[in-house]
Image (cartoon, rainbow, N blue to C red):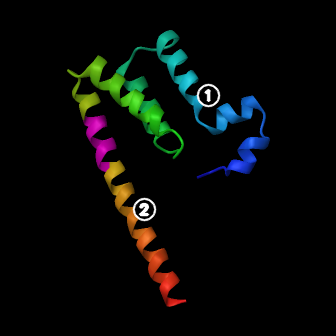
Amino acid sequence: EIVDEKQLESADDEVKMILNGKLSYIVYRESINNISKDVNFHINLLEISALFNFTEDLQAEIARDLYNKYSSSELAISALATLSIWKENQIKLSQKLDDFEKEYEIIQ
């Protein structure tokens, strides 16, 4: 978690939107509706959002849009498969780090 509850409670509404990833969702919706309906644009936004741990809902939305709008595109399907593999590796890494922390805790 990037921000703890106390910090979030003291933040104003605009900051709360940013910290909760709401702003990124709004930017995504506006950009695909007004700027581009291109598969590459969607993929780039998906790759950028995957860099941040607070954008999981946005990533799911972009992935759904990619699948629903571009399911006949090999590029879109490849990007979705790559994201899936990357996410799986991130989960495995996270589990290994958790196991290490638990083991280290026992040793101390």
In the rendered image, residue 9, in percent from the top left (x then y), is placed at 74, 42
Task: Assign a secondary structure to mark 1.
Answer: helix
Q: Is residue 84 magenta?
A: yes
Q: Is residue 67 magenta?
A: no
Disc 1: which residue: 23
Left or right: residue 49 versus residue 43 is right
Q: Earlier in the sequence, mark 1 or mark 2?
A: 1
Residue drawn 41% across the image and 14% down it: 37
In the rendered structure, which segment of residues is drawn in magenta? 78-85
* Numbered-mark total: 2
On residue 94, which mark appears?
Answer: 2
Q: Main secondary structure of the magenta part?
A: helix
In the rendered structure, the answer to whether residue 7 lies left or right of residue 107 reads right
From the viewer's side, name the closer residue of 41 and 25: 25
Q: Amino acid at mark 2?
A: Ser
Q: Counting other residues with Cα less than 10 Å from the Cα at mark 2, is it few (<14), some (14-19), or many (20 or more)?
A: few
Taking 85 as reference, is 30 above or below it? above
At label 1, the amino acid type is Leu
Assign the C terminus to one quadrant of the image.
Answer: bottom right
Label 2's element? helix
* Vertical comparison of 46 with 36: above or below: below
Label 1, label 2: how far apart the Cα atoms are: 26 Å
